[in-house]
Amino acid sequence: MLSFFASKFVKEEKPKTLGQLGEEWAQEEYRKKGYKIIGANVYNTKGKQAGEIDFIAVNKTSIVFVEVKTRKLITGKFGSGVEAVNVYKQRKMLLAVKMFLQRKAQYQTLRPQIDVCSVVARDVDKKDYSVTILVNSVEDWN
């Protein structure tokens, strides 16, 4: 009888979206390269809305802000993942990064870079995917 009540109130986990899976796979690639993930889906909670950073990774010398774009096909009706990071998106990312570094003084000594990570998921169920990292692909450190 109690198992009936317990099952009624247990929250079922929603299946992950393609974007969420892509971000997890991208984070795993950075971990393999020796980075530690210090934040995911980071955005400015106070003041000006600057956009979201998919995740932030650090090693001994660098802090990397990563924008992940996941597609089922290399190119499709929305273009490639890399093409989706247009000038408007790059400006929002730069603003978000600058605001993050202003608030988090402990990371200001690290070399900042913004990477774009393109994930192509051929078969999600079989975890058949590829991750391409475009290192330091967004620049404007004025």
Image (cartoon, rainbow, N blue to C red):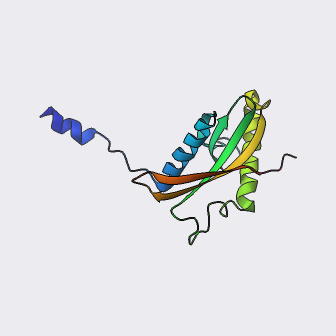
* Residue 50 appears in the figure: no
Residue 88 percent coordinates (x, y): 73, 60
Image position, residue 18 (x, y; %): 48, 55
The residue lying furthest to the right in this view is 142
Q: In x, y percent, where is residue 91?
A: 76, 55
Tell me which residue sits at (83%, 50%) in the image: 140
User: Which of 33/94 is in front?
Assistant: 33
Q: Is residue 26 left or right of residue 1?
A: right
Note whether residue 87 is visible. Answer: yes
Quarter of the N terminus within the rendering: top left
Asked if residue 8 is positioned above or below residue 34 in the image, the reply reads below
Q: Nearer the viewer, residue 72 or 42?
A: 72
From what the image shows, is residue 122 above or below residue 63? below
Q: Nearer the viewer, residue 53 or 59?
A: 59
Residue sitting at x 68%, y 59%: 85
Number of callouts = 0
Q: Residue furthest bottom?
A: 77
- Give me the residue at 77% from left, 32% from top: 110
Q: Determine the residue positioned at 71% across, 62% down.
A: 86
Q: Is residue 122 left or right of residue 80?
A: left
Q: Nearer the viewer, residue 48 or 98?
A: 98
